[in-house]
Image: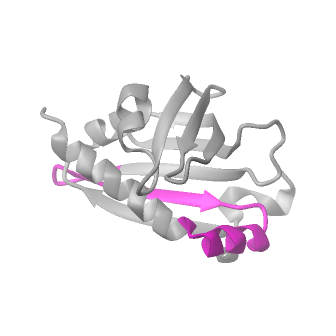
Amino acid sequence: MAQNSSPAAAPADRVIVQKRMFDAPRELVFEMWMDPRHIAQWWGPDGFTTTVQQMDVRPGGTWRFIMHGPDGTDYDNRVVYIEVTSPSRLVFNHGSDVDDDPNQFHVTVTFEERDGQTELTMISTFKTAEERNRVVEFGAIELGKQTLNHLAEYLATIQR
């Protein structure tokens, strides 16, 4: 990554921030991101399903999955984990399942305990403002909200 494109120093025009409170303890919310049996139940926007092909959640590990769209289109995805700090933080690069994906973006997800609930913050950082704007126009913000809504719905079914 070029010196001026560090995710930590990214200007606002390259970033999408999504926050959500979950009525569940932080350890449980974090677990939903770690286990392929769980993540396949909630990952993706309305009408999508997810098939996990590989999930190795550790620094340098890879999560490969296919999102199946409601129109029958399959979307190959690859996540490469950079940091995994249980139960507080995940950092990864997310792109399509090709090497050197030019549209790959950087994601930091934090899990903060708030009186028995969990505040999740997901920060997606894009290489350029143009790329960020392209995914916003595609509907990324609403699709991200739908995905987090699915997580909340799934958490409500988990008995602990």
* Residue 145: % across, % down: 41, 64
Residue under the image location 58 percent in, 37 percent down: 66
- Occupied quadrant, residue 132: bottom right
Residue under the image location 58 percent in, 31 percent down: 63
* Residue 105: % across, % down: 69, 53
Q: Quadrant of the C terminus?
A: top left
* Residue 138: % across, % down: 63, 69
- Occupied quadrant, residue 67: top right
Q: Residue furthest right?
A: 2
- Occupied quadrant, residue 42: top left
Q: Is residue 113 visible?
A: no
Say left or right for 121 vs 75: left
Q: Magenta includes 49? A: no
Q: Residue furthest front?
A: 71
- Report the span colored magenta: 112-140
Q: Is residue 117 visible?
A: yes
**Is 114 located above or below residue 98 in the figure?**
below
Q: In the rendered view, how is the structure colored?
A: one colour
Judge by depth and name the residue closer to the eye, 118 or 141: 141
Say left or right for 99 vs 33: right
Residue under the image location 28 percent in, 43 percent down: 26
